[in-house]
Every structure is written in C-alpha cells, then in structure tokens.
Image: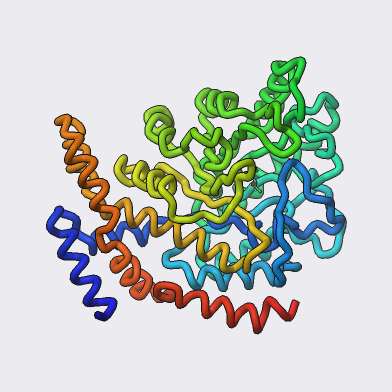
C-alpha cells in the first residue's frame, strides 16, 4: 500500500471518532520546536579561550564529526532541519558568540557577536532563542554564580544575564518573533548545607537586578529553569523548583520545566495543567532522564506522549513553549537532533489523534472502564500512517529513510573534519 492509501485508511479510522486528520495536520504544521544548538558540538561553544565544561554539565562519547566552527554547526543544523517536518527555532547559548578571534569575556558580549546567527536565521526563516552561559568559566569554578558569596562574581554574572536579555531582544526585533531567554545556573553544594536560606536570598537579589532592566515582551520573554540536583550539587541546588516557581509567579516570568530535573518518579506531564491555571505561558526543556543523568536523546516514550497529551488536550499549544535539551556524543549528532525532534513532533501528532474531548466526558461521567479501554486502544491506531503522510507532504524523508541522508552527510562532511 502506498503512503496515500495508508493515510486514507487511517483517516477513516480516526474519522469514526470525529477526528479530522487533515485539520490535525494543519494544526501540527503551526507548531514550532526550539532546537538546541548545543547537541551539535557537545556544549563546547566558540569562545576563544576554551574552558573545561563545568556546572555538572557533561557530555560523554567521542563520535566523530563534532562541529568545530559556527559554519560547521550551522551546516549541521541545516542538515538536521532538512529532515524534520515543519518550521522551527534554534536555541543558542552565549558561548556560541562569534568574536572573530578576539577574547571577549561574557560580561562584554555585544549584539554584533551574534550577527551571523541572525543572518542565517533570516535566510532560513527560523526564530532564535537564547541562554546566558553560567558554567564552563573560571568565575563559575566554585559551582556558584548568581548566589556566590563574592559580590564581584555575582555582579559579573548579573551583567552577563542582562546582556543576554538584550541579545534575546535583538533576536526578537530582527526576526519578528520573541526570543525566549532562559536562565539556568548550576549553583549548589555537593554536601549538606548548613545554610540554605542565605544563598537563596542572594539568588533572589541577583534575579531582581537582572530583571529590573525593562525589555519589551514583544521581543524577549524571560524564563527561569530549576533543577533538583546535579553532578557536584547532589545535596542542594539553590535554584530549586519551588524557588523559581514562586519567583516566576511573583515577577511575571516564565517557569521553564526541564523533564530531566525532577525526582525520577515525578513527572512534568502532571505539572503542566496546574501551572497553566496560574501562568499565561510556560516553557519546557524536553529531555530524557536516565537514572542520575538528565540529558539523553528524546524517545517516544510514555512520558513524552503524556506531555504532548497535556498540551494538546488542554488547548495549550500556544501557551507551552517547547524546547529540547539533550546531548549525546556517542552517536551521530545530526541523527540525535533528528531523532529527538521528530519524536517531539510525533508525540504531538499522537496526542492530536486521540479523542480527547470524548475521553474527558467519560471521566466526568465516571466511566473509567471505557476511559482505560479507549486510551489503550488508541495506542495502536494507525498514527504511523498519518506521520508518514505528513513527512511526505512536508518534503522530508519518510520513515527511517532520513538515516541514509545522515550517513551520506557523515561520509561527505562529518568524517572529513
Ligand atoms: C542543565 C540545564 C540547562 C542546560 C543547557 C545547556 O542541567 O538543563 O538547560 O542543559 O542550558
Ligand atoms: Zn535544561
């Protein structure tokens, strides 16, 4: 059977449940995912003085072909984007500045250091998002940044964050779509603190200084990202979930939930509905936690589907800003982007092809038997046929055929580096 025939067959199956697949695909087309640039070079960045990775951020593996220059990184992103259906965004970190061989510390960054990225994004019709980089730097070597007891160090990072928001604003102005500038810091302690309050007070004070600078939300949105623990901050993280949740609520910032930053039995899918009741918008870093590590390539697992269902069934596609955050250097990096991003889109499609309204009614009626029965049956409805058709219509490779393109690119480009 052809892709079209499979699609027609699937369409009928969904139509029986009142789901119009063509409308669903129109809706899916509008979803844009923020693809993190750092999968392409193992969060190395292009600073002239290359610092060791720190802040609990570590990337394992030495698969050949890592991007060494901005041109290489953009070319790899172009390749991945050509294999992913839809129109998306690219998420940058401050360490991806291009300073033309000049040593520019992070509190001295200028808009011009991101000109090439903007030019590229314009050409490719992409939005850009941004992150200040508060790790892999001598001033973050103690594992403390915005909550550091030393005022000079705090000030350095405060200035870096203010600059970063201006870079976000510049992206928004240039590209006509607001940048999300997300703040994550590694601050914490390896062992049990004797004082939790003081570092948190200092973080609060630093954030207030960073956000005191007014920036038009038309161009830049601010988000704050929490973490439960990290490598080297096992016992205590200053910027915990409660800390940022309250900070965001009180100061009208976005709370960003990284799916790898919670206790293993705690799920982000279960947080979305609560947060949507209190915030206009929230942001995600979709990742995959594996035991103590939080950054594996996103797969189409139950939690990913559940996150997608929560976004779709609560009509929140415009309120949940979806970004990805994973880094694996043990596999082809272009493939990693492609797999993770295609899975995110697949999960959203899956969620759109479930009779969500009817299932809600069943729950209200107390018919938990039919609720469970249908939720299980829909797992094997022919959503793969719809996905294949969507890929074909969007001009990207169908099924696993994208892998062949990655292999060719690997031979012709990556292995020659
Ligand atoms: C780290 C956070 C953070 C980073 C990126 C590189 O635990 O998840 O989002 O992964 O900013
Ligand atoms: Zn993250």
Q: Position of residue 31 (x, y in %)?
A: 40, 56
Left or right relative to 231: residue 378: left
**Is there any visible trace of residue 391 in the rendered image?**
yes
Q: Position of residue 78 (x, y in %)?
A: 57, 71
- Which quadrant of the structure image shows residue 388? bottom left
- Pick out the residue farthest to the left: 16
- Residue at 39 percent of width and 29 percent of height: 274
Eyeballing the image, is 22 above or below 155?
A: below
Left or right relative to 263: residue 12: left
- Which quadrant of the structure image shows residue 228? top right
- Residue at 64 percent of width and 39 percent of height: 183
Q: Position of residue 413 (x, y in %)?
A: 67, 80
Q: Quadrant of the C terminus?
A: bottom right
- Residue at 82 percent of width and 45 percent of height: 137
- Closest to the observer, 226 or 17: 17
> Which colour scheme appears in the figure?
rainbow
Left or right relative to 76: residue 357: left
- Closest to the observer, 62 or 34: 62
- Residue at 57 percent of width and 58 percent of height: 90
**Is there any visible trace of residue 71 in the rendered image?**
no
Q: Quadrant of the N terminus?
A: bottom left
- Which quadrant of the structure image shows residue 371? top left
């Amino acid at each position: 059977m052809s892709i079209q025939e499979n699609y027609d067959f699937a369409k009928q199956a969904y139509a029986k449940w009142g789901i119009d697949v063509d409308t669903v695909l129109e809706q899916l087309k509008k979803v844009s995912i923020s693809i993190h640039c750092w999968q392409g070079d193992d969060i190395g960045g292009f600073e002239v003085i290359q610092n060791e990775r720190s802040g609990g951020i570590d990337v394992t593996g030495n698969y050949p072909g890592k991007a060494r220059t901005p041109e290489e990184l953009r070319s790899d992103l172009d390749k991945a984007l050509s294999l992913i259906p839809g129109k998306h965004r690219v998420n940058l970190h401050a360490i991806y500045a291009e300073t033309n061989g000049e040593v520019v510390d992070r509190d001295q960054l200028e808009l011009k250091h991101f000109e090439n990225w903007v030019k590229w994004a314009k050409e490719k019709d992409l939005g850009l998002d941004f992150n200040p980089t508060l790790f892999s730097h001598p001033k973050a070597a103690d594992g403390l940044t915005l909550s550091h007891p030393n005022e000079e160090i705090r000030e350095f990072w405060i200035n870096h964050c203010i600059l970063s928001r201006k870079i976000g604003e510049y992206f928004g102005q240039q590209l006509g779509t607001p940048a999300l500038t997300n703040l994550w810091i590694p601050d914490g302690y390896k062992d049990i603190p004797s004082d939790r309050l003081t570092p948190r007070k200092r973080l609060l004070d630093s954030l207030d200084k960073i956000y005191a600078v007014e920036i038009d939300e038309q161009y830049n949105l601010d988000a704050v990202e929490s973490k439960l623990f990290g490598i080297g901050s096992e016992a205590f993280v200053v910027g915990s979930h409660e800390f940022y949740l309250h900070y965001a609520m009180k100061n009208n910032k976005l709370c960003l939930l990284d799916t790898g930053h919670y206790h293993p039995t705690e799920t982000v899918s279960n947080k979305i509905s609560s947060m949507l009741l209190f915030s206009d918008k929230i942001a995600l870093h979709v990742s995959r936690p594996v035991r103590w590590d939080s950054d594996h390539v996103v797969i189409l697992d139950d939690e990913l589907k559940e996150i997608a269902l929560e976004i779709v069934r609560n009509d929140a596609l415009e309120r949940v800003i979806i970004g990805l955050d994973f880094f694996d250097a043990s596999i082809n990096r272009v493939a990693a982007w492609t797999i993770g991003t295609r899975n995110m889109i697949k999960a959203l499609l899956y969620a759109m092809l479930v009779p969500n309204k009817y299932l809600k009614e069943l729950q209200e009626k107390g018919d938990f038997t039919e609720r469970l029965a249908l939720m299980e049956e829909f797992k094997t409805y022919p959503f793969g046929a719809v996905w294949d058709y969507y890929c074909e219509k969007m001009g990207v490779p169908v099924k696993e055929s994208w892998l062949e393109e990655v292999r060719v690119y690997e031979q012709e480009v990556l292995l020659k580096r």
